[in-house]
Each structure stands twice: as C-alpha cells, then as structure tokens.
Image (cartoon, helix red, strand yellow):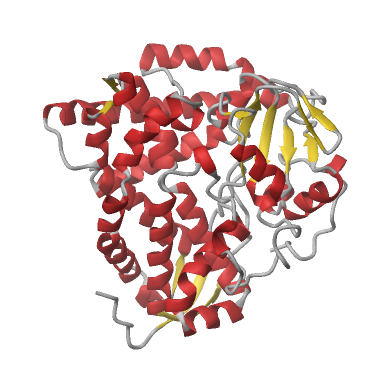
Amino acid sequence: MADQTTEIPSPEDVNFFEPATNDCPYHAYEAMRERAPVWKDPVTGMYTLTRYEDVRAALLDAETFTNKIGNSAGATEKGVKPEDPEKARQLLEAAEVEEQLQKLYEEKGWPVCPTLSGRDEPEHMALRRLFDWAFRPQRVRELDPFVESLANRLFDEFIDDGRCEWVQAFAIPLPLYVIGRQMGVPEQDMPQIKAWTDAWIQRMGLMQTPAERIWSAEMEIEAQHYFQGRYEELRRHPSDTLLSDLVNNEVKDWKRKLTDNELHSEMMADLFVGGSETTTNALSGGVMLLIQNPEIWQQLKGNPEKYLEPFVEEVLRLESPVQCLLRETSKDVELHGVTIPAGSIVSLRYAAANRDPAKYDKPQDFDLDRANPRSHLAFGLATHHCLGAPLARRELFYGFKVLVERVEDLWFIEGANDFKYHQNYFLRALKHLHIGFTPRKVRVAAAA
C-alpha cells in the first residue's frame, strides 16, 4: 500500500531483511536499478541484479549462472559471506545448524538431495523430461473443468456472507486442492499438507532462527513419512496421477526411477510448494490490485473475454509472487564496472526486472493493453522456466474468471487489513486480505 509514497532509499541503506522493505521492496529496487545495478548485499554477501536485461541475460546463460546453489536454503551453506556480522547473525547461525539438520534427516527421515531446480545440464534436462511428461499440456487442459468447478465451489462457501478473508477462503485452497488432485491426495489431508509446506517455505525464506529451522525440518520429516506410504502404495498399485508417474516412470537417461530421497526432496520444492505458492500469492495480490485500481476492475468486468488473460499477466508482472531466485557463478563476471567473482551467489530479482522502465513504459501502472504481456520474468526463462507455469496460468484465469462472474463490486473491509507480507527473502506472500463484495444478483453462466 506504500508503493506510491515511500521515499526512494540509497542503495547502501537497503536491507531486504527489514519488515518494511519486505512489505514494499519496490523503491529499493528503483534505487538499485538506477544507482547500483550490481549490488553486493552487506547482509548476505550475495550479488543482486535488478535490471531487466541483466536478469534476462543471466537466465539465458546457464553455464555462467549455474544452479549449483540449489534451492534457497542452500544459501546458508556456502557463498554467504556477510560484511556485517551483526546484521547477518541469523544467517550465520542458520549455517552452523545445517550439520545438526543433516543428522536429523539421516536419523528420522530422508536426507535432502538436489531437486530439479537445483541441477545443471545434463542432469537437469534428463529429470525435466520426466516432469514435462507428468505436466504435459493435455493433462493440464483436462484439469480446466475441475479448476473452474472448484473455484465456484469455494465461492459458494462465502458468497452469501458478502465478505471473506480472501487468502484463506480462496487463494490458498484453489491451487492447493488442484495439485492435491494431481497427486492423488484426499482434500481432507490438505490442511495438514499446507502446514508442512508453510514450514518448508519459512525455512527456505532465510529469516528463521536456528530453533525455527530445526522445527521446519521436523515438519518436513513428518511430511516425508506421510508421503512414503503413498509411494509404496503406488508402486504396488499404480494410478493415473502425476505422483504415480513420478514414482513409477524411469528417468530414461539415468536408466532408473527416482529414489525415495529424490521423491521426498521434489515433493516440497517443486510439487506442493512450486505447484501452489505462486498461484496463491498472485490470486491474493491480484484482488488487492483490483481494489486499489477500480478502473481496472471496471475494464475487466466489462470485457473479460478480452482482458482476463492480460490481467493475469499484469498481476504476475506487478506482484512477482517469486521475487527472486539464486544462481552461482562458474567464472568471474564483469557487469556495470563490478566484478562478480567465480563461486559467488547471485540473486536475480525478477520483481525488480519486471518494473524496469527501460523495458516497460510506466512500469508501475496497471495496463491491460500493454504490448507483449508475457514478456515478464515472473516464471523465469529458458532452461529453468517454471514447469508449472501453464497450470498456474489456468488456475489464475479461472480464479479471476469466477470472481468476475459472481461479484458485482468489491472493497477492503475498513480497519481489517494491515497489508503485511510474510517475512521471506524470496516470496511475496500477503498474510491476509479482508474484502467485502456485492454478489451478482444473476450469476453469469460459466462457459461450457
């Protein structure tokens, strides 16, 4: 909510671990794009890229900007070299507890191993082919009726109240129940799975104390034991679910199936978190933006056939549910007069790139007629482009479609919102959004 009024800071004053910056990072991005396009974070020692062309170039050069760092939790294990030990205390303590966590996984669960997003070629593409088959376009298209029906069913639960807490009532369950259906997990189990994935996300976010990191690991181990039973059942009795495909199909280039350790690691990082979190955050941010921009609501409501898809893309660009991901340099990189040494951790700030005025005219504005609406980097690019992007787009399309069909007008509940975000270095996740609305007197018929 402070996006248009916050004073632009000096790059040296930026701290992404401060709650105020976490809640509204866009003025920090502006300062960095203009004055420090290659910025070394004094808290983490990581280098940060914020200009569109620089982030895009790094994503296209997977040999130089490698995925050896893996998921963001690995940033506490190597490459993090803080210049200010006091500011970096939590990160340093988190690094020290990694050995304890590894022992915990070995004794009580299954040790974490590299996931799809943490592999480079040729291992990445070998594994990617298995996932591409599991997420094949035909399977995604076949989910459309279920997604639309689910969206209407969720609306049925609160539409007569004229108000709801949008995040819990709709933004979380829609993508979570969809990925649950794909995985063959009963809906009644989803609240517990959400608790496990939230714990994983908190650990991934680089803002936990050592005790909290241990708690997150224990929660993940609980999830591992839950899913282990499902793997064993699917090996005995394969099904037509995505999970059955991943359990029973070989990675052809490896001439073997995924191990239990590999399945458990993928379950959190690339499936339940990757398969729901981006959509949840975009559904939350999209409704907030609609209320803040009533002219966009009227435009969307007046011609949803024309504007629904560009609306989804503008939400993804403006909110960037995944604010950044990490890469590790394989060699020295010279950029804007700065040397990024080989072995450095680089934060690619998608959210900053997506509001770069060198790429977008009036980037802070919500424009449903913007040219090339899919040019944003919200889903990454090239080799590591988000494999779940087609499904996320379908979920967002039907989520907002049903909103337009069933609601005449909507607003913030006065005094109920603080517009705070979960503290996370990588994700932009609104905590809650209390909205009021006028239901449509005559429900618009859903498309066949």
Lateral position of residue 42 relative to residue 191, left or right: right
Tell me: 320 left or right of 86. left
Q: How many labels does the image show?
A: 0
Which of the two residues, 425 or 210, is positioned nearer the viewer here? Answer: 425
Locate residue 79, reporting x and y percent: 68, 21
Q: Is residue 434 among what the camera can see?
A: no
Q: Where is residue 321 in the image (x, y as percent from the top left)?
A: 56, 51
Position of residue 267 measured from the top left corner of the image (x, y, whole percent):
37, 33
Position of residue 136 relative to residue 405, above or below, is: above
Outermost residue to the left: 237
> Does residue 290 appear to the left or right of 1 in the view shown?
left
Closest to the observer: 445 or 356?
356
Vertical comparison of 222 with 375: above or below: above
Q: Quadrant of the C terminus?
A: bottom left
The one of 15 and 386 positioned closer to us in this rendering: 386
Q: Residue furthest bottom?
A: 441
Asked if residue 368 shows in the view, the reply is: yes
Measuring 31% from the left and 66% from the top, which residue is drawn there?
Answer: 148
Rendered location of residue 188, percent (x, y)? 25, 47
The relative height of residue 403 versus residue 30 in the rendered view (above or below) is below
Q: Residue at x 38, y 28 (%)?
A: 126
Q: Quadrant of residue 107?
A: top left
Quadrant containing the N terminus is: bottom right
Residue at 73% x, 37% y is: 48
